[in-house]
Image (cartoon, rainbow, N blue to C red):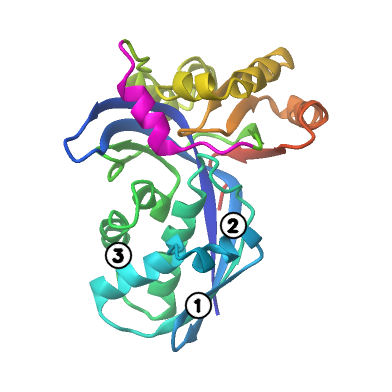
């Protein structure tokens, strides 16, 4: 049996720089793996099957939707040729549709896991190439860590992983359509563009103060407009002493960067304020295995 951890990500900076004729958007993002993760196990089998403790994902096949983990199995088989199947078990901990690449990181872990299970001999670069065919965030999730992501997400430049930094995650109990957020962004006359280069510099210099100062997300204003609670959560985080707060991806998850001494207190205050939401302290940085 092979085991893989699938780490969630946050965007320390996300800039949408343009829209292609095919509908995809060009982005420049600083992507950061965090300690929150799913766990997948792989055992050799005749067919590819998926078992999970998440009821929503377990129902996907009943709705005729291809689960992204099984899609990764199919795409890898198309690339490599038939090599066998696998019984895949997913322990789901990353909230679904949260803007933290929960599905993408599971797909990436599947590529890594099958590569190990069957000794396919594929390099990380090859796995990233295959990952592009699954989804825009999947290439980053193959290796994770800290990276500048460009193009539609497939052009990756590794950055120095910062020192361990405490964060608190809040995922509101709402659904956000990434497609609708990008469409609304396209209609903005004067969209916000964060200084991605300044964030890259801050990360490489391991300067938490500069990281906090340069947090920015081009999509945040759109999603806040659709779901004002996102802005309310950020304001509450800052009022409770967080050093900085930002929405990840197209939302709705918000993360707060905080000092070690304050993370437990901030988590408690947020749980009291938002008892129906996912609230949990995590971290990012060099200590993630």
Q: Which of marks 3 and 2 is in front?
A: 2
Which quadrant of the structure image shows residue 117? bottom left
To which residue does mark 3 refer? 123
Q: Which of marks 2 and 1 is in front?
A: 1
Q: Using residue 229 as the reference point, say whether residue 101 is left or right of it.
A: left
Q: Give the range drawn in magenta.
A: 174-189
To which residue does mark 2 refer? 38
To which residue does mark 1 refer? 49
Question: Crowding near pointer 1: few (<14 within 10 Å), some, many (20+)?
Answer: some
* Residue that protrudes farthest toward the front in the picture: 63
Q: Nearer the viewer, mark 3 or mark 1?
A: 1
189, 116: nearer the viewer = 189
Asked if residue 116 is positioned above or below residue 57 in the image, the reply reads: below
Q: Please provide percent x and percent y for residue 102.
A: 52, 50
Picture residue at 43% right of the left edge, 37% below the top: 178
Image quadrant holding the N terminus, namely: bottom right
Question: Which comes before the other along the chain, label 3 or label 2?
Answer: 2
């Amino acid at each position: 049996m092979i085991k893989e951890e699938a780490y969630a990500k946050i965007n320390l900076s996300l800039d949408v720089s343009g829209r292609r004729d095919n509908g995809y958007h060009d982005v420049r993002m600083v992507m950061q793996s965090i300690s929150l993760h799913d766990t997948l196990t792989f055992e050799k089998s005749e067919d590819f099957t998926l078992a999970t403790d998440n009821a929503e994902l377990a129902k996907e096949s009943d709705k005729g939707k291809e689960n992204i983990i099984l899609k990764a199995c199919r795409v890898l088989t198309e690339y490599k040729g038939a090599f066998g199947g696998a019984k895949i078990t997913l322990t789901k901990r990353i909230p679904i549709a949260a803007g933290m690449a929960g599905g993408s990181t599971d797909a990436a872990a599947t590529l890594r896991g099958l590569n190990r299970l069957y000794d396919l001999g594929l390099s990380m670069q090859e796995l990233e190439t295959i990952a592009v065919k699954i989804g825009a965030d999947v290439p980053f999730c193959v290796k994770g860590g800290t990276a500048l992501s460009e193009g539609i997400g497939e052009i990756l430049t590794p950055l120095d992983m910062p020192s361990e930094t405490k964060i608190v995650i809040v995922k509101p109990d709402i659904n956000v359509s990434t497609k609708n957020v990008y469409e609304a962004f396209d209609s903005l006359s004067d969209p916000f563009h964060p200084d991605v280069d300044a964030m890259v510099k801050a990360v490489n210099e391991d300067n938490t103060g500069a990281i906090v100062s340069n947090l920015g997300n081009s999509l945040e204003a759109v999603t806040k407009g659709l779901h004002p609670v996102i802005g309310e959560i950020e304001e509450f985080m800052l009022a409770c002493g967080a050093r900085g707060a930002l929405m990840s991806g197209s939302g709705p998850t918000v993360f707060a960067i905080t000092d070690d001494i304050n993370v437990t207190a901030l988590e408690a205050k947020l749980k009291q304020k938002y008892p129906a939401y996912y609230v949990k302290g995590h971290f990012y940085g060099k200590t993630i295995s």
